[in-house]
Image (spheres, rainbow, N blue to C red):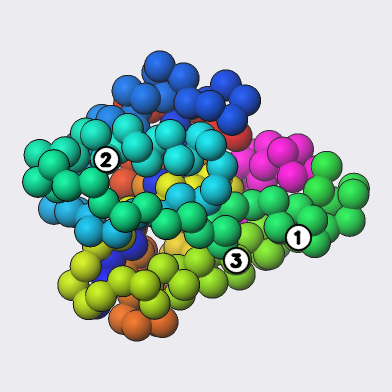
Amino acid sequence: MKTIVVIRHPEKDGDKITAKGAMQIFAATLALVALGYKPTKFFYSGARRTFQALLVGIAAMAETLGMIIPEIVKCDWLHFQPILDKLDRADADAVLTDIKKIKAAGGTLKIALEMSKYAVLARERMGLALVHISSLTEDDETAFALSHSPLTEMAALDIETAPYALGEADAVVYEMDGAKLVSSKLIKAPIEGKTN
């Protein structure tokens, strides 16, 4: 079994995390380690804000990691831009507006998948991201991956209750048996942040 903890980036200003964002990801990382998630692999989406957040998280875990600088891998599957590129202009422009409509209708993944072309493509993409990261992770290892929302949460198994559009530094823990997703669990950030 492999554990992949996908964390939404914290508060940002453009493509850089803010001071509050650094505190959010520092606290979130320490909370995840306290819950027993001790990563040996690290991935980020390629965006500056996810790389910065990952570096702050690694600094928070310095003692846990034995002060060893870990390998950090860019994983394009964790980024949302290729999804937007597949949509026509109107659907791509409507993604943020759709989030408000989906939240007003109940805010679950099930509702998002019924209402949004983006959500359908994002679920497929996050599934592929998990398979890719799992292929680079050994059995009994834990990987931390920094991504975005709505994307981090999109592979959750319980679509009836899983929320769409996570808060800053919220995480979803995915358990993988090889390429098969066997469980998912939301872990809210200790310092609450905005959602999209």
User: What amino acid does circle 3 point to?
Assistant: Arg
Q: Is residue 69 above or below residue 2?
A: above
Q: Is residue 128 above or below residue 171?
A: below
User: What amino acid does circle 2 point to?
Assistant: Ile
Which residue range is magenta in the image? Answer: 94-112
Picture coordinates of residue 109, whole percent (x, y): 56, 57
The Cα atoms of the two marked residues, 3 and 1, are separated by 12 Å
The Cα atoms of the two marked residues, 2 and 3, are separated by 26 Å
User: In the structure shown, which secondary structural element does the residue marked by tag 1 occupy?
Assistant: helix
Disc with the residue nearer the chain's start (3 vs 1): 1
The local crowd at label 2, few if under 14, some if 14 to 19, many if 20 or more residues have their Cα within 10 Å, is many
Q: Pointer 3: what residue?
A: 125
Of tags 3 and 1, the one toward the viewer is 3
Q: Pointer 1: what residue?
A: 117
Q: Pointer 2: what residue?
A: 58
Is residue 103 found inside the magenta-colored segment of the image? yes
Q: The C terminus is located in which quarter?
A: top right
